[in-house]
Structures are given as structure tokens and as C-alpha cells.
Image: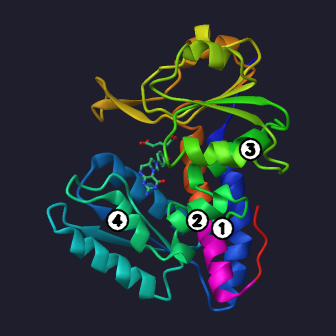
């Protein structure tokens, strides 16, 4: 039987474990604070921001939010970032991507204090990750590692094919899985839009991670029986539902499920884990800045 991996349940366990550490920090007068910054009014981003605020409330993290007008000059966003860097109550913050076209996201990331960069996107943190000395693991790749751990999949010596080479998922996940570590030691293949014979690469894998942002790109015909399938895609596809869309992964779930030994659903797979690992990084940031040791899950 194929195991459907319950990302909501694993994320709930992580939130529960974080709650104790958050109270330890709060008892020391250092309750963790997380801010989200949203420039413009991308509807998907607004949904995520709302979910993150609810997560913070549940675990006892102080949550803050800053809206920046989508038509404002980049300097307005940069000033917001400078304020957050200077605010001792903000231990971590993220600038929700995408930003409007007239703003270069790299210019944004470079201005974030690397010790508050709970996305793990700042070049200093990317460099540390690649060098095997990560400060903050990017949330989605870390969530994928935790999901594999939750179903007792040991990555050592496994062939992992990642479909997608993004700076926020594909590249950092490849680096983490390559590391000489209990949750690494994999042989990693990274595929992308110019890859020849994608199916040959996915059929060779013990674990396939789909993170390309193309709805249902990976289907059962591209998988060998027994493969573990992790679907990072959260594509909003127009549909006749209350919201006017449905969420579709990068994997065609029904055909992939026939082949997989375990598979994540969308929604309810990687998405909630991304949010849980953001809370994790926020607690880690607060612990480092306040010099209060805490246990992390
Ligand atoms: N600076 C920055 N950091 C991010 O981490 C970041 C970002 N920008 N921009 C957009 C992507 C996407 N992302 C998701 C987070 C949670 C869910 C999530 O919780 N999804 C739920 C359901 C969501 C729904 O119902 O719409 C699920 O899959 O079950 C999805 C997607 C974070 N991102």
C-alpha cells in the first residue's frame, strides 16, 4: 500500500515541540518575534501571510506584518528592511516573493540582516549552507528533509532526483542532501527545463522531489515502482470551485500514487512543512540573538 505522507500532522508535531522552547525564551524576556513583509497584493502571498500569522499565534511567536504599496519605489521597501534590521523585537523576517517587477529581489535579500534571514536566502547564508555550515536551512528544503525523516527514509546512498533548479528549493535541497550528514549522503541529480530525457532521470531515482512549478509534470509513467515522491508544487489552477481555483502539485497524484511507496499530497504535504520550518528558524534566530539555549526538533 502506498503511504500518503501527512504533512499537516508532521508540521503539527514540530509546532508542538517548538512551543516549549518558545516559552523558555519568553520566560527569559525574549519571546521570539517574526515579521512578514508583503509588497503589492499578490493573492497567493496574502493567503500565506495569513496562515503564518495563525501559526505564530498557535505557538506563541509574536507576529508582525508590514504592507508596502506595490507601486512604491524600491527605496520604500529598503527603508522597511532597515527598520526591521534595527528592531530588537524582530528576531526574524521574510520578504514575501514575488516582489513587483520594478524591484529586483536580489537587491532586497542583500539588505536583510543575515542573522534575521529566516528564509535563508541572503548570499552569506547561501554560502554557509554550501560550505556545510548552515545558519538557517531554507524552509522548504528543510521541510522536505523532515518529511523523509518522518517516514524513516534514510537518504544515505540513495539516488535522489530533484526536478527544478530554483534558488529557493532545488539548489539548496541538492546541497543539503549532498552533505556528509545523517540527513544527507545522497547521490543527487538536479533536472530542469533543458534536461534531456527527464523520465530516465526520474525512473532511476529512489526519491523524486518535484519542485518546478509546472502542474502535474511528473506522472506515474516517469516513476519506478517503490519510489518515494515528494511534491513541492503549489500551483493555483483555474477551477470551478468557491475560490475560483484549485491547488495542483507538480506531480500527477493519481498515476504517481500507483507507483510510489510513499507520496505527499497537495495540499497537506510540503506546504505546511515550509511554514513549520519558518517557525523553527525564527526560534533559532531568537535563541542565537538572545543567547538563550533551547532544544530544537
Ligand atoms: N520569501 C518567501 N518565502 C517563502 O517561503 C515563500 C515565498 N517567499 N513566496 C511563495 C512561496 C510559497 N510558499 C508556501 C508556503 C506555504 C504553503 C502552504 O501552507 N500550503 C498549504 C495550503 C495553501 C492554500 O490553501 O492555499 C498546503 O500545501 O497544504 C504554500 C506555499 C512559501 N513561499
- Disc 1: which residue: 135
Q: Which residues are magenta?
A: 281-292
Residue shown at the point (68%, 83%) measured from the top left: 25
Q: Nearer the viewer, mark 1 or mark 4?
A: 4
| Label 1, residues with CA under 10 Å away: few <14, some 14-19, many ≥20 | many
Q: Secondary structure at mark 4?
A: helix
The residue singled out by tag 3 in the image is: 178
Assign the C terminus to one quadrant of the image: bottom right
Res. 260 image quadrant: top right
> Disc 3 and disc 1: Cα gap in Å?
17 Å
Q: Which residue is mark 4?
A: 107
- Distance from label 1 to label 2 (Cα)? 6 Å
* Image quarter of residue 76: bottom left
- Judge whether residue 205 is colored magenta: no
Q: Are marks 1 and 2 in contact (CB under 8 Å)?
A: yes
Give the alpha-carbon distance from disc 2 to disc 4, as whole Å.
15 Å
Q: Residue furthest bottom?
A: 29
Q: Residue at x 62, y 84 (%)?
A: 289
Q: Is residue 9 visible?
A: no
**Quarter of the view holding residue 21:** bottom right
Specify which label sits upstream in the sequence, 2 or 4: 4
Amino acid at each position: 500500500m502506498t503511504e500518503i505522507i501527512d504533512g499537516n500532522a508532521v508540521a503539527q508535531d514540530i509546532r508542538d515541540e517548538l512551543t516549549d522552547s518558545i516559552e523558555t525564551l519568553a520566560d527569559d524576556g525574549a519571546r521570539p518575534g517574526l515579521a512578514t513583509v508583503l509588497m503589492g497584493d499578490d493573492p497567493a502571498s496574502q493567503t500565506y501571510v495569513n496562515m503564518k500569522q495563525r501559526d505564530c499565534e498557535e505557538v506563541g511567536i509574536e507576529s508582525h506584518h508590514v504592507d508596502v504599496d506595490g507601486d512604491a519605489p524600491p527605496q520604500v521597501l529598503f527603508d522597511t528592511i532597515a527598520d526591521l534590521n534595527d528592531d530588537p523585537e524582530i528576531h526574524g523576517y521574510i520578504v514575501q516573493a514575488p516582489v513587483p517587477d520594478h524591484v529586483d529581489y536580489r537587491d532586497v535579500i542583500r539588505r536583510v540582516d543575515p542573522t534575521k534571514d529566516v528564509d535563508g536566502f541572503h548570499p552569506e547564508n547561501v554560502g554557509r549552507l554550501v560550505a556545510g555550515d548552515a545558519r538557517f536551512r531554507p524552509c522548504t528544503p528543510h521541510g522536505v528533509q523532515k518529511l523523509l525523516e518522518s517516514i524513516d527514509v534514510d537518504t544515505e546512498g540513495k539516488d535522489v532526483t530533484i526536478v527544478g533548479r530554483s534558488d529557493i528549493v532545488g539548489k539548496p535541497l541538492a546541497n543539503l542532501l549532498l552533505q556528509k550528514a545523517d540527513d544527507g549522503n545522497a547521490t543527487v541529480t538536479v533536472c530542469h527545463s533543458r534536461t534531456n530525457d527527464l523520465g530516465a532521470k526520474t525512473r532511476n531515482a529512489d526519491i523524486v522531489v518535484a519542485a518546478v512549478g509546472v502542474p502535474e509534470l511528473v506522472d506515474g509513467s516517469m516513476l519506478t515502482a517503490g519510489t518515494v515522491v515528494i511534491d513541492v508544487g503549489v500551483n493555483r489552477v483555474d477551477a470551478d470551485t468557491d475560490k475560483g481555483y484549485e491547488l495542483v502539485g507538480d506531480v500527477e497524484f493519481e498515476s504517481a500514487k500507483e507507483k510510489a511507496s510513499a507520496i505527499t499530497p497537495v495540499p497537506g504535504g510540503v506546504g505546511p512543512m515550509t511554514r513549520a520550518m519558518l517557525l523553527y528558524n525564527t526560534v533559532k534566530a531568537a535563541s542565537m540573538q538572545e543567547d538563550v539555549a533551547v532544544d530544537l526538533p
